[in-house]
Amino acid sequence: MKLGIAGLPNVGKSTLFNSLTNAGAESANYPFCTIDPNVGVVAVPDERIRLLGDMYHSKKVTPAVIEFVDIAGLVKGASKGEGLGNQFLANIREVDAIVHVVRCFDDENVVHVDGSVDPARDIETINLELIFSDIEILERRLAKLSRTARMDKKAAKEEALVRRIVSHLEEGNPARTFETGDDDDDRFWFASCNLLTAKPVIYAANVSEADLADDGASSTYVQSVREAAAKEGSGVFVLSAGIEAEMAELDDEEREMFLEELGVKKSGLEKLIQASYSLLGLMSFLTAGEDETRAWTIRKGTKAPQAAGKIHTDFERGFIRAEVVNYKDLLECGSLAAAREKGLVGLEGRDYVVQDGDVVLFRFNV
C-alpha cells in the first residue's frame, strides 16, 4: 500500500512524514522545502505476529508495511503549473490513497500560505486544483472520442459517460463521489481514467497539543474538516504532528507513558493505519513457523488462492487447499498440532474467503 502525504505548504506534512518514517525529510518554515518526494516504508504495528513469533521462536518476524510518500506542497494554480504543481500532480497520481494534512491550529510563528487558518478553504483549494487537472485530462479524452463516437456505438457510450463525469467535476465535486451505476463498461472506463479526485482520501486534522486529548471534539477547525469529509465519504483522524515528532525519538515504553500523560490512547501512526485499512477495505492474514512469522495485507473478500498468490505466484497456480486457524486459537493451543487435535483447524478450498487474523498454511503443487 502506498499513501501520499499531501496538503498546502506549512501544514505539517513533512513533520508528520518524519515522525512516521524517521526518514529525515527536511522540515522548514517556508513553502516547497520538500521538492522531490521523500519515500519511507513503515512497519504496521501488529501484536499478533509478535506473539506468534515468540511461540514459534521464529528466526524472523516480518510485519506488513505501508509506503509513505511526502509530496511537495500545493498552492492555487498548481493545475496550471504554479509553484511545484506539476510535480505534485505527477507524484500523487502514483499513490493508492491520499493523506490530506489540514492545519487545525493557530501559531503566529508558522506562516500560512494564505495568511490565515481556514480548514474548509484549504481543503477546497487542493480539491479544486485536482478537479481542474482531472477536467483537463477528460477534455483531451473527449477530443479523441468525439472523432469516433458518430461511427462507433461503444465510443458514443463512453463519450456520454465522460461528459457526465466532467459535469460532475465542474460542479466542484470530486470524482470519488461520482456514481457509475451497475454498468460494467461504465465502471471500466471510469477506472481507466485514473482521476486524481477518484482516489480515496484520509484527512489528517493537525491540531495543537491542547486539542489532542478530546480528539479535536472542542475544535471548530476539526469540526470543519469532519464536515467536509462527511460530504464525500472520506476518512478523518486527529493528530498533532509536533507531538508525533517528539514520540518518534522515544522507545516503545517511553512512548506508551507519553501517550498516557497526554490522555491519548493511540498514536497518530496507529490512527492513520486504522483509517487507511478501513477506507481501502484491507486486512491481514498471517503465516507462522520457525523460519518466519509474517503478516500479509490483502483486500477484504479475498479468496484463499489469491491470498496464497500474495506469498508466491506458484502458491496460487498450484493451490490445493489451505489449513486455517484463528491466531487466538493457535496461541491458546500452543501449536498447530494441538489446534488440529481440538478440531480448530479448518481445511479450506478455493472458495474460502480469508478472514482478518487467520493463520494459514497453504498446500500447493506445481
Image (cartoon, rainbow, N blue to C red):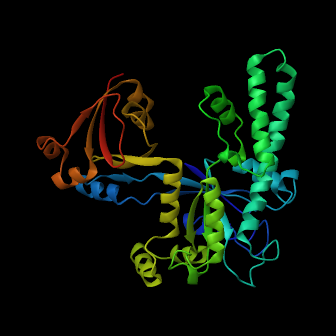
With respect to residue 169, does 190 lie above or below? above
Q: Position of residue 49 (x, y in %)?
A: 34, 55
User: At x 35% / y 28%, what residue is drawn?
Assistant: 350
Residue 25 in sight: no
Q: Residue at x 75, y 66 (%)?
A: 122
What count of labels does the image hold?
0
- From the top left corner, tell me how far across and down residue 176 is, in percent: 66, 46
Q: Is residue 136 above or below residue 155?
A: below
Residue 100 vs residue 340, the one in the foreground: 100
Measuring from the top left, give residue 222's x and y in whole percent.
62, 72
Outermost residue, left side: 341
* Residue 183, quarter of picture: top right
- Apparent side of residue 56 relative to residue 337 in the rendered image (left or right): right
Residue furthest to the top: 151
Observer-nearest residue: 156 or 4? Answer: 156
Q: Nearer the viewer, residue 166 or 282?
A: 166
Q: Could you tell me which residue is drawn at 26 percent across and 58 percent down?
A: 54
In the depicted structure, whether residue 348 falls above or below residue 28: above
Q: Is residue 63 left or right of residue 335?
A: right
* Residue 61 located left or right of residue 109: left
Q: Is residue 214 left or right of residue 353?
A: right
Above/below status of 361 relative to 252:
above
Image quadrant occupied by the C terminus: top left
Q: Position of residue 210 (x, y in %)?
A: 57, 84
Q: Is residue 179 visible?
A: yes
